[in-house]
Image (spheres, grey):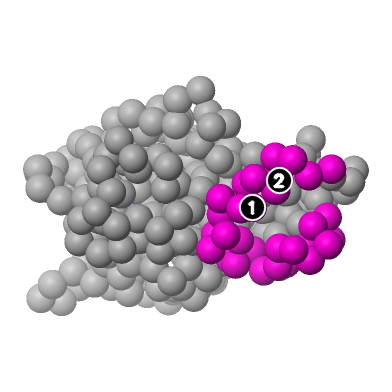
């Protein structure tokens, strides 16, 4: 199953078109895309049995983020060995760095993003997992059962502020408006041949800059849910940015950052793509 946020309303994506959930369910389920995660099991049950109307065509720029207002967003640093190495860090052996992307940075899949003045703005394609049922003290074996779905994410990062000061400012430097696009929709884990092995690619102006596979995550989606939920509860609709593979601008020689007019396309196998254009 695929669900989307179409012009602010929860939709099922079927055969490339959209079905409005509030209308199709006679208002049993709210149009609010974030509200569905609180009733995730009930919603999946309804969606699997409902007699649905014909889907309606839509354009990608009508989509918003499939989880627009999570109560908690977790982002994971240094979760691929090749990216830890290009960043000049040792790969973590305990829990990797965990930070947040503040909720106002979350956007839909097709956007224009303003570059912060005086900054070095960089790309990080990531697999994003959205929590379905509340997870607390969950074992790794149980963890996929707490995932509503997967989406493509971009952990856009302003490196000057991220790395300034006596301690790094990961959360602020990665939370400018539009710095957390998610989409284009949410795909349930059962749709993947192997949800632990998804190819991620990212290109700038048509030139491929990142290519990796989630099987190379140091902490897999299920390991992250288990480790995080041992510390605090993960709530329905929470978002996890799982980390980026190698190929970010800061790790290149020479270093390269986003400039006005650049187009960033981020793709995950079996999910779809994000498209960001940068402006001064
Ligand atoms: Zn990241």
The residue range painted magenta reads 22-51
Q: Is mark 1 within 8 Å of ligand 1?
A: no
Looking at the rendered image, the quarter that the C terminus falls into is bottom right
Residue at 74% across, 63% down: 28
In the image, 270 versus 195, the foreground residue is 195
Mark 1 → mark 2, Cα distance in angstroms: 6 Å
Q: Position of residue 242 (x, y in %)?
A: 35, 48
Looking at the picture, tell me which residue is in the foreground, 273 or 50: 50
Horizontal and vertical percent for residue 3? 66, 49
Q: Main secondary structure of the magenta part?
A: helix
In the displayed structure, does residue 114 sit left or right of residue 250?
right
Above or below 155: residue 117: below
Q: Residue at x 15, y 51 (%)?
A: 95
Tell me the residue that label 1 is attached to: 43
Which residue corresponds to the image point at 21% horizontal and 50% vertical from the top-left? Answer: 227
- Give the camera-side residue of 141 and 164: 141
Q: Kindly tell me whether residue 53 is visible in this rendering.
A: yes
Residue 203, how many percent across, how many down?
51, 41
How many neighbours does mark 1 have within 10 angstroms: few (below 14), some (14-19), or many (20 or more)? some
Q: Is residue 178 left or right of residue 156?
A: right
The residue carrying mark 2 is: 47
**Is 152 on the left-hand or right-hand side of 28?**
left
Q: In the rendered structure, does residue 45 fall within the stretch colored magenta?
A: yes
Q: Is residue 230 above or below residue 206?
A: below
Which mark is on residue 230?
none
């Amino acid at each position: 199953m695929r669900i989307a946020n179409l012009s602010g309303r929860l939709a099922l994506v079927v055969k490339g078109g959209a079905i409005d959930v509030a209308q199709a369910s006679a208002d049993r389920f709210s149009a609010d895309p974030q509200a569905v995660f609180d009733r995730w099991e009930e919603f999946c049950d309804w969606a699997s049995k409902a007699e649905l109307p014909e889907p309606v065509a839509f354009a990608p720029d009508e989509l918003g983020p499939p989880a627009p207002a999570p109560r908690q967003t977790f982002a994971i640093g240094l979760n691929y060995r090749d990216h830890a190495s290009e960043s000049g860090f040792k790969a973590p052996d305990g829990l990797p760095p965990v930070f947040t992307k503040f909720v106002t940075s979350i956007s839909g899949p097709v956007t224009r993003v303003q570059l912060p003045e005086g900054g070095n703005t960089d790309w990080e394609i990531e697999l994003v997992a959205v929590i379905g049922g509340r997870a607390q003290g969950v074992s790794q074996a149980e963890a996929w059962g707490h995932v509503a779905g997967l989406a493509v994410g971009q952990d856009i990062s302003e490196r000057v502020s991220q790395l300034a000061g006596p301690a790094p400012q990961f959360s602020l430097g990665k939370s400018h408006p539009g710095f957390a696009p998610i989409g284009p929709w949410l795909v349930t884990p059962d749709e993947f041949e192997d949800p632990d092995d998804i190819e991620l690619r990212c290109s700038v102006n048509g030139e491929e800059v990142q290519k990796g596979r989630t099987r190379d995550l140091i902490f897999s989606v299920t390991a992250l849910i288990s480790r995080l939920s041992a510390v605090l509860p993960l709530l329905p609709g929470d978002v996890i940015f799982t980390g980026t593979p190698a190929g970010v601008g800061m790790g290149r020689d020479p270093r390269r950052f986003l400039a006005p007019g650049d187009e960033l396309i981020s793709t995950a196998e079996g999910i779809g793509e994000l498209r960001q254009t940068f402006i001064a």
